[in-house]
Each structure stands twice: as structure tokens, then as C-alpha cells.
């Protein structure tokens, strides 16, 4: 066992120190090409939400709704209108959305 530990120390550690200067390159956060933009909402979405698993019912419902509204539009457009969607759809509460009356749906349809 002692030989194994010494072997690791003398054979592996030099390489760790040799390549440690490259460590920052390996862990540096990179962005997808579509997120390389001056639009701060797109950058923030990429860095904090894109590819992150959603756990809550409201979060999952929000993603499904926004993806549905995104059809034919750019994701940038949807992100910039996200707060309006949240207001119209009661914070993406599925129970409240399901209970919407026709009048509330028409009002939501006419909202910007």
C-alpha cells in the first residue's frame, strides 16, 4: 500500500502541477453562440437557467408555456415578454390558469 501511495505521489502529482496553469481554461464558463450577445437577459438566461433542471410544478409549467409561445418567435422576444406572461398567467400557477374564465382569457389575449 505504501508503494502505491508513493507511486501516486511521484508519478501523478508532477503532472497535476505541470497542468495546473491550464486548470482555469478547463473550468472557465463558456457560452453557446446564441448567448454571445449584448442582450443581458439572454446572457443571464444562459448562465442561470439554460440547461438547469426545473423541479417545481410552476417552473415546469412556465417552461412549457414559454416554449409553446416561442413557436415562430425568437427566444429573445419571449424572454423580454416573460414578466407580462407571468402577470397574465398568475405566476404560471397551473390551478389558477385552469380556473381562468373566458373573460380572463380574452383579457389575457388582448394584453401586451
Image (spheres, rainbow, N blue to C red):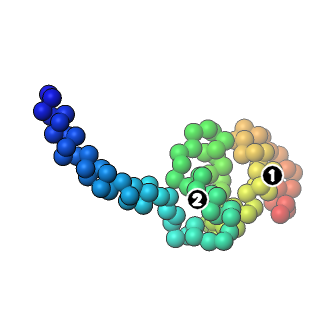
Q: Does the CB distance between marks 1 and 2 fall below 8 Å?
A: no
Residue 88's disc number? 1
x then y, percent, for residue 73: 65, 70
Find residue 78 and report its horizontal and vertical position in percent: 69, 63
For mark 2, give the secondary structure. helix
Q: Which residue is mark 2?
A: 46
Q: Residue at x 73, y 57 (%)?
A: 82
Image height of 64 relative to 73, above or below: above
Left or right placement of residue 109 versus residue 69 in this view: right
Q: Quadrant of the C terminus?
A: bottom right
Q: Helix, strand or loop at disc 1?
A: helix
* Image quadrant assignment for residue 99: top right
Q: Is residue 112 left or right of residue 4?
A: right
Q: Quick check: can you spot residue 15? A: yes
Q: Is residue 22 left or right of residue 51?
A: left
Residue 60 in the image: x percent, y percent? Answer: 60, 45
Circle 2 Cα neighbour tier, 10 Å, few/some/many (<14 / 14–19 / ≥20): some
Amino acid at each position: 500500500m505504501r508503494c502505491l501511495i508513493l507511486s501516486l505521489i511521484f508519478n501523478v502529482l508532477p503532472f497535476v502541477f505541470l497542468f495546473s496553469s491550464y486548470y482555469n481554461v478547463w473550468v472557465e464558463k463558456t457560452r453557446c453562440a446564441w448567448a454571445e450577445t449584448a442582450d443581458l437577459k439572454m446572457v443571464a438566461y444562459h448562465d442561470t437557467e439554460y440547461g438547469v433542471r426545473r423541479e417545481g410544478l410552476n417552473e415546469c409549467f412556465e417552461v412549457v408555456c414559454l416554449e409553446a409561445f416561442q413557436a415562430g418567435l425568437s427566444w429573445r422576444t419571449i424572454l423580454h415578454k416573460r414578466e407580462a406572461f407571468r402577470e397574465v398567467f398568475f405566476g404560471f400557477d397551473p390551478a389558477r390558469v385552469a380556473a381562468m374564465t373566458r373573460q380572463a382569457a380574452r383579457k389575457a389575449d388582448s394584453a401586451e
